[in-house]
Amino acid sequence: MNSMRPIRNISELERAGLIDADQAISLEAVTERYAVALTPTVARLIDRTDPADPIARQFLPDMAELAVTPEERADPIGDHAHSPVEGIVHRYPDRVLLKAVHVCPVYCRFCFRREMVGPQGLGTLDGEALDAAFAYIRGHSEIWEVILTGGDPLVLSPRRLEEILRQLADIDHVKIVRFHTRVPVVDPLRIDAALIAALKASGKTIYVALHANHPRELTSEARAACARLVDAGIVLISQSVLLKGVNDDPDVLATLMKAFVETRVKPYYLHHPDLAPGTSHFRLTIAEGQAIVSALRGRISGLCQPTYILDIPGGHGKADIGKSSVREVSEGCYSISDYRGGEHVYPPDP
Ligand code: SF4
């Protein structure tokens, strides 16, 4: 059975046939701690006959979330340490995050901001806080790019989005506005003419970073939503999280990256999972991740290659952790490894 309304609690999960009565009782402890939401699109995508379904694993609460390991932390990528005013994270000189909203259409079980998003999260910035955030951006001429994230900024109404973007329109040094979102995949019909007009209201160059982790998420409806954005002149890039039991397989990842490219979404980031509380069941080791990313290299076009990155815990920014294929063996002489693991001297012997 499929609900036509969003699913937001245990009894709705049970009514939709996504969990049974026994699970409903035990999972209360998880949902008291972390928010739950599935859109009808996501609920329909779940294969109820597959106990290891990669869509279910991303969105259905799991008892494993109650196991918090010592290295996990509430703010795994160190947002708070770089937040000069409410809603702004200024980690790198030329760009800021603007977290206008801490609500999402779905709550991913591995979310790196799971302690900040949801009904008990940090909420939505009010007018005064937004004014302070814009004043901060206006006062820092080095800010070239504003990244709306959260939460998912595309849950805001077109009217609210347009108000935000019209504020950015007046700030000359901001040239790029980027949105991080799951909406084209989890609620594709939301990408309509009104929302696209709002996204373009600043007159700036607009990028949308689409979050999807499994090729089944790129349904025909999701691809059509992306096409509406691209056809409107918005540039699409991807971001995915490398997740145990979801996409930790070179074939699955290759299919996902090819699906992005077919949809005119340029693969951008493949994130190593962050140390968010209760997410150790999703994490693989960096060596395992590097092996999967190396296997992608020989398998799919350069157009389809994402950069494998780690957000260094504590707010130290992103690092490219794809295995380096170059090693200096003597001064000016390198060993280069090919995608099959073969080693080649560079420059080659005369
Ligand atoms: S959509 Fe993004 S911010 Fe929201 S729960 Fe998923 S990962 Fe977290």
Image (cartoon, helix red, strand yellow):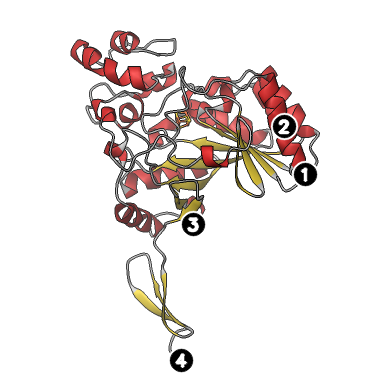
Mark 3 vs mark 2: in front: 2
Identify the image quadrant of residue 22.
Answer: top left
In the image, what residue occupies the spot 37% across and 54% down? 293
The residue tagged 4 is 350
Q: In the figure, is residue 230 to the left or right of 116?
A: right
Mark 2 vs mark 4: in front: 2
Q: Amino acid at mark 2?
A: Phe
The disc, 2 or 4, on the residue closer to the chain's N-terminal end is 2
Identify the image quadrant of residue 179.
Answer: top right
Residue 202, visible in the rendered structure: no
Q: Amino acid at mark 1?
A: His
Q: Are marks 2 and 1 in contact (CB under 8 Å)?
A: no
In the image, what residue occupies the spot 43% across and 10% down? 4
The residue tagged 3 is 302
Q: Are marks 1 and 3 in contact (CB under 8 Å)?
A: no
The residue tagged 2 is 134
In the image, what residue occupies the spot 49% across and 84% down? 332
Q: Marks 3 and 2, Cα distance to the nearest angstrom?
A: 38 Å
Mark 1 vs mark 3: in front: 1
Report the front residue among 346 and 226: 346
The residue tagged 1 is 173
